[in-house]
Amino acid sequence: MDALDQFCRAIPKVELHVHLLGATLPATFAEWAARAGMPPAEAEALYSRDAKPKGVLHILRALEGRLLKRPTDLHRIAYEHLQAAAAENVRHSEIFWNPTGTAHLFPYAAGADAILAGFADAATDLGVSALLIPAIDREDTPEAAAQLVEWMAAHRRDAIVGLGIDYRETDRPPELFWRAWRAARAAGFRLTCHAGEFGCHPRNISTALDLVGVDRLDHAYTAVEDPALLEQLRDSGIVVTVVPTNSYYLRTLPPDRWALDHPIRAMAAAGLAIHPNTDDPPMHRITPGGCWALLARELGFGRDALRGFTLNGIRGAFLEDAAKRHLATAFAAEFDALEFPAA
């Protein structure tokens, strides 16, 4: 680990864009694959991330459909993820979970309580806090999304703070799920939306802003194709969680152009309030520190930019204002005490 890696690991961090099933560790995945009778070669092939990565959705579907068995499995993923994150100086994490994907195994309430128990154990043992964001599976029906919000409203918990949406975006725009969005907002939940993730039209981002009325955006890369939308995002100050290891750009950009042409550079240059995240960390073969090091080493962001990204994350978190003020003061002091390595 060189000086830049050490610096980035030491940065105090929040993570706002992590998927619970995508945080399943390789050893845990292999153990559950064996439990389900999956041949080791198949399990290894499922979990692989090639030079031209094919994404991780197929792995998440395997977990939902074949490998997960009981609510305690979700507790284990949550705790193991927070344990790994805390070792990278992550102090707070906000984690997506798709409850409809496990509804055939156990009820929403049982899954949610198991995850929150994992959060509580991690807070006690590791000093890291976490919040849960149930997410619409956009490959499922609008009716399933509306039912998810009913589950959330019927089983309210302080650590369940918002509604998100993920999975394949290409032909499933946010407005399909307007009833779920409206019900979640009426019930007092915060809203965030994956949009513009897979090279999809920037109208999905506009819809998330103007129709859904999100409090935060996830990905939003194709905003760079629409100057007016970029200006709107900049002026709104909305925090956009970005993922340097997003598989779409690793697949579609030539290796020698990836760092130069990645939309994250243009988003920051346009003044958007971006914040870097790991998404599905073990499956992307990335750590929180490694994610920040990519921004510095490959995308060319310096100390001041990294400091700004740190504070953007706190501002975009779904924490209470008092907690955010405390974190902002503490993180700024800790960051300023770190020595940025010379080029």
Image (cartoon, helix red, strand yellow):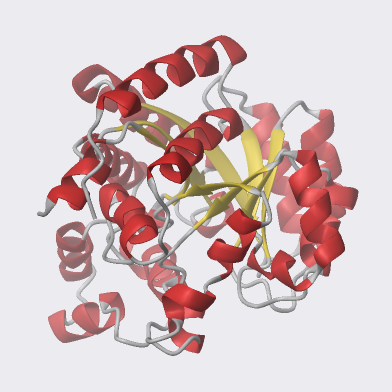
At 21% from the left edge and 24% from the top edge, which residue is drawn? 126
- Say whether residue 213 is left or right of residue 102: right
The quarter of the displayed image where residue 15 is located: top left
The image quadrant of residue 177 is bottom right
> In terms of depth relative to the viewer, which is nearer, 131 or 143?
131
Numbered circles on residues, count: 0
Instruction: Tell me which residue sits at (77%, 75%) in the image.
Output: 201
Residue farthest to the right? 211
From this view, report whether residue 300 is shown above or below residue 233. Answer: below
In the image, residue 231 lies at what x, y percent?
81, 54
Left or right placement of residue 119 versus residue 339 in this view: right
Query: Considering depth in this image, is 224 or 30 the residue closer to the camera?
Result: 224
Task: Indicate the position of residue 60 as horizontal and vertical percent values.
Answer: 42, 66
In the rendered image, residue 96, in percent from the top left (x then y), is placed at 51, 47
For the point 83% across and 68% down, the residue is: 203
Q: Is residue 94 visible?
A: no
Front one among 77 and 213? 213
Looking at the image, is 250 positioned above or below residue 228?
A: below
Q: Quadrant of the N terminus?
A: bottom left
In the picture, residue 153 is in which quadrant? Answer: top right
The C terminus: image quadrant: bottom left
Residue drawn where x is 35% and y is 29% of the image: 119
Q: Position of residue 21 (x, y in %)?
A: 39, 56
Q: Is residue 303 visible?
A: yes
Q: Residue furthest left?
A: 1
Q: Is residue 187 above or below residue 76?
A: above
Compared across the picture, whether 288 is left or right of 302 comes to: left
